[in-house]
């Protein structure tokens, strides 16, 4: 009996894209940074089944320290502290399943975008590098799926993440693909992987995130090194378009006013277990300023302010125009005490990008 079928019940209808395929007849190294990164990537390949010990059961007691990863520390609100310990534990487990599922779906998006980049970037070195990234992303899909299946069930993709992935896959502009994936999605992911890896005490999750985060640091470096060469060649109009693409991608997952943010999806998940979103948010509003502290207090910055925006600044994609819009969006969501009451204060307190992203992501540097 043949149980193979050409169409599968779990696939989505095809998404039409506007990608153009570009041949390149120069095979000599041309962008040395990218050629070096490609060699590094080839040397750093690992094998999920060989290099991780999958026999271990997930240690749920140690898993409980896994951070919620929210821009506001909900676990320090009086509402959260009054919840029974068992509810807190279950809420933590569910939020981790939700976050890991979105890491997983994001990895599938990255796999497909990286494969597109092989086709549409014009430089040979950039095509080579994107080929190694495609392999990395396949492995990331593999390991996250396997881990979640041990922990819980795979949750559906959050609507905001799907919107960014669709926009990045369907655009015909390869620079937008790089900005959408390498800078925004992978910037968000890198920040979250770092935080989860450094704080979780669950050994298999820690090991897995160590391998994945090392690869992701390279993917981010690819985006930075390539785009920073491209931006000075752009017209003002083209640069503005890229800036807006990055802002819109960040907004859709962070801004709760879009109705598609990660926080909105998470509150919906919690509502099913009796955590009242209105009561929780009212408590957050009331206690917000003391929870987040001021921009100078060394508190958690969150992935946009702490990593994505500093990357855009380095790339020349953070004009005053777009800075004002980022500031307005963040202030609306996490409060002026967290991001600065004025755009000047916001800009003054942006961190520098780490010099060595791989060391930063593994907690070896500030
Ligand atoms: Fe990845
Ligand atoms: Fe990646």
Image (tube, helix red, strand yellow):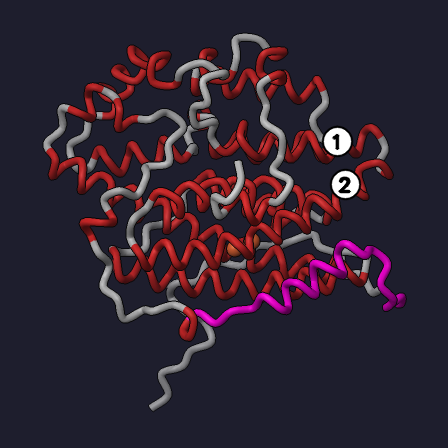
- Viewer-proximal residue among 303 and 270: 303
304 to the left or right of 58 = right
Q: Is residue 289 left or right of residue 331?
A: left
Q: Secondary structure at mark 1?
A: loop
Quarter where residue 10 is shown: bottom left
Residue 205: which numbered mark, if any?
none
Nearer to the camera, 131 or 275: 131
Name the residue beneath numbered marker 1.
Answer: 316
Mark found first going from the N terminus, 2 or 1: 2
Taking the spot 62% from the left edge, 30% from the top edge, the residue there is 352
Kindly state the secondary structure of the residue where label 2 is placed. helix
Pointer 2 residue Cβ closer than 8 Å to ligand 2 = no
- Most extreme residue toward the top, as rendered? 341
Seen at 47% across and 30% down, the residue is 302
What is the x, y in percent for residue 200? 32, 46
Q: Position of residue 100 (x, y in %)?
A: 37, 50
When asked about the image quadrant of residue 125, the answer is bottom right
Up the image or down, 43 lies above or below 212; here it is below
Q: Residues within 10 Å of mark 2 (few under 14, many from 20)?
A: some
């Amino acid at each position: 009996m043949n149980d193979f079928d050409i169409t599968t019940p779990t696939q989505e209808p095809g998404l039409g894209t506007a990608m153009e395929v570009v041949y390149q007849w120069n095979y000599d190294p041309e962008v040395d940074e990218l050629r070096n990164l490609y060699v590094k990537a080839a040397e750093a390949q690992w094998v999920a089944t060989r290099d991780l010990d999958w026999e271990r059961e997930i240690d749920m007691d140690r898993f409980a320290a896994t951070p919620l990863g929210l821009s506001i520390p909900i676990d320090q609100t009086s509402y959260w502290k009054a919840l029974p310990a068992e509810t807190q534990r279950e809420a933590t487990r569910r939020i981790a399943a939700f976050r890991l599922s979105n890491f997983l779906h994001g990895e599938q998006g990255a796999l497909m975008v990286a494969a597109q980049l092989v086709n549409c970037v014009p430089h040979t070195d950039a095509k080579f590098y994107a080929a190694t990234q495609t392999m990395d992303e396949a492995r990331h899909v593999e390991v996250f799926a396997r881990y979640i299946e041990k922990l819980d069930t795979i949750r559906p993709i959050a609507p905001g993440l799907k919107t960014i992935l669709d926009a990045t896959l369907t655009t015909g502009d390869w620079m937008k693909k790089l900005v959408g994936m390498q800078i925004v999605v992978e910037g968000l992911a890198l920040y979250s992987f770092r935080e989860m890896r450094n704080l979780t005490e669950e050994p298999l999750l820690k090991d897995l995130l160590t391998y994945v985060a090392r690869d992701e640091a390279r993917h981010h470096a690819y985006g930075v090194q390539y785009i920073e060469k491209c931006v000075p060649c752009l017209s003002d109009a083209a640069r503005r378009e890229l800036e807006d693409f990055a802002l819109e991608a960040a907004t859709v997952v962070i801004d709760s006013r879009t109705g598609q943010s990660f926080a909105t999806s998470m509150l919906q998940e919690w509502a099913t277990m009796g955590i009242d979103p209105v009561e929780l948010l009212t408590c957050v509003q009331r206690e917000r300023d003391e929870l987040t502290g001021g921009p100078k207090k060394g508190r958690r910055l969150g992935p946009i302010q702490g990593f994505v925006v500093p990357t855009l600044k380095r790339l020349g994609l953070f004009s005053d125009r777009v800075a004002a819009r980022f500031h307005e969006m963040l202030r609306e969501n996490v409060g002026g005490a967290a991001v600065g009451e004025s755009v000047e204060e916001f800009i003054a307190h942006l961190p520098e990008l780490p010099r060595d992203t791989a060391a930063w992501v593994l907690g070896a540097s500030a």
